[in-house]
């Protein structure tokens, strides 16, 4: 595991990003879920260093990390947070119809599925604000997953 930091410069495919994260408090459970377990909430800022565009999103640590008091993210954690953000984008790209989205992810409560679906749509708009095209989102996430499966996330970190 890497050192605890507040930012990481990463190169994924042909894109370079500066990813920053800070703990902004804790929550009783994940958004749109009532799991009853507390989590630390992090505000993640991503800047595309190729075009200067940036965006932000919230990322939530695990309950186990909450119990350990982990309020800072490693460089690898920041890459994983970015991957989670991109996965939210993929959910809407892969299932553009809200009913298909609900079926794919097992939602049966319309009020919850609409909130989650809209949150994923917001993530996609934010990714596009970074200057990412849909095919690039797929490429970026595939590269991160490949490195993650090889236990080599650190290879993406350049500073």
Image: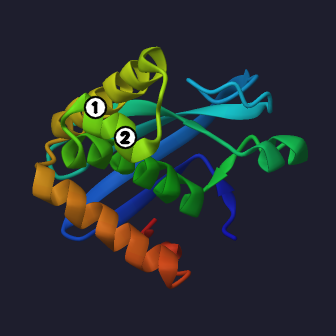
Q: Is residue 40 above or below residue 112?
A: below
Horizontally, residue 113 falls left or right of residue 41, namely left
| Identity of the residue drawn at 46% across and 65% down | 159
Q: Residues within 10 Å of mark 1 (few under 14, many from 20)?
A: some
Way the structure is coloured = rainbow
Q: Residues within 10 Å of mark 2 (few under 14, many from 20)?
A: few
Of all residues, the one furthest to the bottom in this rendering is 150
Estimate the x, y position of residue 102 in percent, counting from the top left: 37, 35
Residue 60 visible within the image: yes
Horizontally, residue 64 falls left or right of residue 144, namely right
Badge count: 2
Horizontally, residue 109 falls left or right of residue 35, namely left
Q: Quadrant of the N terminus?
A: bottom right
Horizontally, residue 97 falls left or right of residue 20, namely left
Estimate the x, y position of residue 90 in percent, counting from the top left: 28, 49
Regarding mark 1 in the picture, which secondary structure is present there?
helix
Estimate the x, y position of residue 64 in percent, counting from the top left: 82, 49
In the foreground, 35 or 151: 35
> In the drawing, what numbered circle is on residue 103?
2
Q: Is residue 126 above or below residue 78?
A: above
Tell me the quarter of the picture where residue 11 sits: bottom left
Disc 1 vs disc 2: Cβ atoms closer than 8 Å?
Answer: yes
> In the drawing, what numbered circle is on residue 59?
none
| Identity of the residue drawn at 72% across and 23% down | 27
Estimate the x, y position of residue 158 in percent, counting from the top left: 41, 70
Residue 85 visible within the image: no
Tell me the quarter of the picture where residue 100 sits: top left
Regarding mark 2 in the picture, which secondary structure is present there?
helix
Of all residues, the one furthest to the top in this rendering is 111
| Identity of the residue drawn at 21% across and 30% down | 125
Per the image, the residue denoted by label 1 is: 99
Q: CA distance from mark 1 to mark 2?
A: 6 Å
């Amino acid at each position: 595991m890497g050192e605890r930091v507040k930012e990481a410069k990463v190169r994924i495919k042909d894109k370079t990003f500066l990813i920053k994260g800070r703990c902004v408090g804790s929550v009783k459970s994940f958004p749109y879920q009532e799991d009853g377990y507390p989590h630390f909430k992090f505000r993640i800022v991503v800047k595309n260093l190729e075009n200067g565009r940036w965006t932000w999103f919230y990322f939530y640590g695990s309950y186990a990390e909450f119990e350990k008091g982990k309020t800072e993210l490693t460089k690898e954690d920041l890459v994983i947070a970015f991957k989670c953000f991109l996965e939210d984008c993929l959910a809407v790209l892969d299932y553009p119809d809200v009913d298909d989205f609900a079926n794919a992810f097992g939602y049966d409560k319309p009020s919850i599925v609409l909130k989650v679906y809209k949150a994923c749509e917001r993530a996609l708009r934010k990714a596009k604000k970074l200057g990412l095209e849909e095919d690039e989102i797929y490429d970026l996430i595939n590269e991160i997953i490949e490195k993650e499966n090889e236990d080599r996330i650190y290879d993406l970190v350049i500073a």
